[in-house]
Amino acid sequence: MRLEGKVALISGAARGIGAAQALLFAREGAKVGIGDIREDEGRGVAAEITAAGGESLFVRLDVTSEQDWAGAVDAVLDRFGRLDILVNNAGIAERATVEDTTADEWDRMMAVNARGVFLGTKAVITYMKSAGGGSIVNISSISGLIGSSWATAYNASKGAVRLLTKSTAIQYAVDGIRANSVHPGPIQTPMILQVFPNAETRESRMSAVPMGRFGNPEEVAYGALYLASDESSYVTGSELVIDGGATAV
Ligand code: NAD
């Protein structure tokens, strides 16, 4: 198993890409902490892992709260005794131009998508240094690589994640901590249905993808699995694009 003996904490793992990562990591032998604000769905994912013979713990985690992060890391360490992998996955999205984005919406997007990743990273760094290393996987987006006609604060927040990842990688390489970003294209999750609520807009988004379809959450989870595992032991500060060719055009 690819994560045998390892312990992971995944934010936003109650549904979508985060839940797929939690289930896959558990199948590959990891004990998994599931942090989310959606308590029922989060506990459901943890129960699914336990029912399949794995080990999992749900912790209520609002990624914008430094206190919640401290509590989540403590809970995972108390329960599993170590923490090898952090996946900063929680995120929110919108569809709005510069003119249509309010200052409050900008702040909210940056709070969850950028501050949340910073606080998560900060919460595990001291422990990972003392433990001799770890892997931090930050879920950015292709919106962190290229501009968009329909997103504003989301792009800015995901661009911030891309470069925070590289600074983390550089600062802590000497401590055995690796940090990499994942850049999914459109993936079939509740988020995509919220951003593209009608079939017409979804079709149009899909037609911009050379593969002509949305990805599924597990296709992203396999990328995160590689970066989380020791298979990527010489990989840090890198960007893994999983987008059906969307940014190749
Ligand atoms: P989703 O909306 O289906 O799931 C996001 C999860 O994050 C939910 O469980 C939600 O409760 C949680 N969350 C939101 N705010 C939170 C907070 N403050 N604290 C803790 N948890 C919080 O979205 P998804 O599509 O699974 O997206 C997961 C990640 O992948 C996000 O960072 C997203 O930006 C990124 N991404 C998604 C797509 C896509 O097309 N779906 C594409 C590129 C990148």
Image: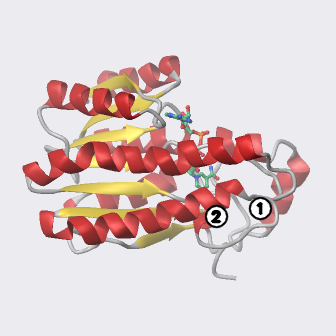
- Residue 222 shown left or right of residue 216 in the figure: left
Front residue (pair 228, 144): 144
- Outermost residue, right direction? 200
- Earlier along the polypeptide chain: callout 1 or callout 2? 2
* Disc number for residue 206: 1
Local secondary structure at mark 2: helix
Question: Mark 2 highlights which residue?
Answer: 143
Can residue 224 be seen here? The reply is yes
Q: Is residue 135 above or below residue 108?
A: below
- Outermost residue, top direction? 40
> Which residue sits at x=87%, y=47%?
199
- Residue 115 shown left or right of residue 176 in the figure: right
- Residue 116 shown left or right of residue 51 in the figure: right
Residue 164 % position (x, y): 42, 63
> Which residue sits at x=33%, y=21%?
51
* Disc number for residue 162: none
> Which residue sits at x=64%, y=64%?
143
Quadrant containing ligand 1 = top right
Does the Cβ of the disc 2 residue fall within 8 Å of ligand 1? Answer: yes
Q: Are marks 1 and 2 in contact (CB under 8 Å)?
A: no
Q: Residues within 10 Å of mark 2 (few under 14, many from 20)?
A: many
